[in-house]
Amino acid sequence: MNLPNMLTSLRFVMIPFYVVVFAKGHLIPAFLVVALAGVTDILDGYIARRSGQVTALGMMLDPLADKLMFITVIISLLVAGYISWGAAGAIFLRDIGMIAGGLFFHFRGKKTVPANWMGKLTTVLFYIGIMFVFFKAPFAEVYLWVVIAFSFVTSVMYIVLFQALNKMKQAELPPADAPTLHP
């Protein structure tokens, strides 16, 4: 258990803490928990890459912690009436599609596309949107819909990159009917 994995684990602990704080109606402290989770997400990735502490456990837990925190926040905002069913549904549709697609292709032996700058930008924009919702900015819902639209654009970009990556992988393989040499 290295430092990046401990930071990731801390995000799992923050989820029920966030729920309790939010349920008590303390919006600003609840948002600060979400912001702290975002900071630990940035830090764990930075430290892991910088110090060569990237682990298989971290690569599995990090996105899981992110998605669970994000889903928890969206559900809480939906239940409290701060965002619409349509916005929450669009967010879930996109995230579930990305997760299901990634798992489907992973288990079929296809290469998956790692997070890139567009995906990271989408995450940052979502966090800004969540901040606007928490602080009850009058344009929060409109901004959130813009980010949702952008997130679908990034999803299409991931699909294009996925297809290109797997076409390259397929081109590297010998044809099925090619003779093989045995030593």
Image: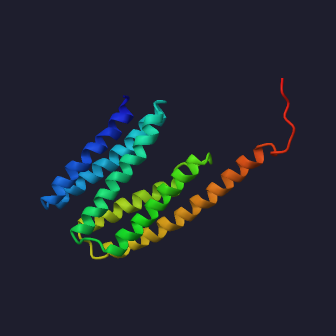
Can the viewer see residue 92? yes
Name above or below for residue 10 compared with residue 108.
above
Image coordinates for residue 78, horizontal then vertical, percent? 27, 68
Instruction: Name the residue: 43% across, 35% down.
Output: 57
**Most extreme residue toward the left, as rendered?**
24
Can the viewer see residue 116? no
- Which of 143/151 is in front? 151
Instruction: Name the residue: 31% across, 72% down.
Output: 140
Name above or below for residue 42 compared with residue 121.
above
Image coordinates for residue 25, horizontal then vertical, percent? 13, 62
With 157 as the anchor, is 33 left or right in this view?
left
Instruction: Name the residue: 62% across, 45% down.
Output: 109
Quarter of the rendering occupied by the C terminus: top right
Image coordinates for residue 58, horizontal then vertical, percent? 43, 37
Image coordinates for residue 110, horizontal then vertical, percent? 62, 48
With 21 as the anchor, is 65 left or right in this view?
right
Quarter of the rendering occupied by the N terminus: top left
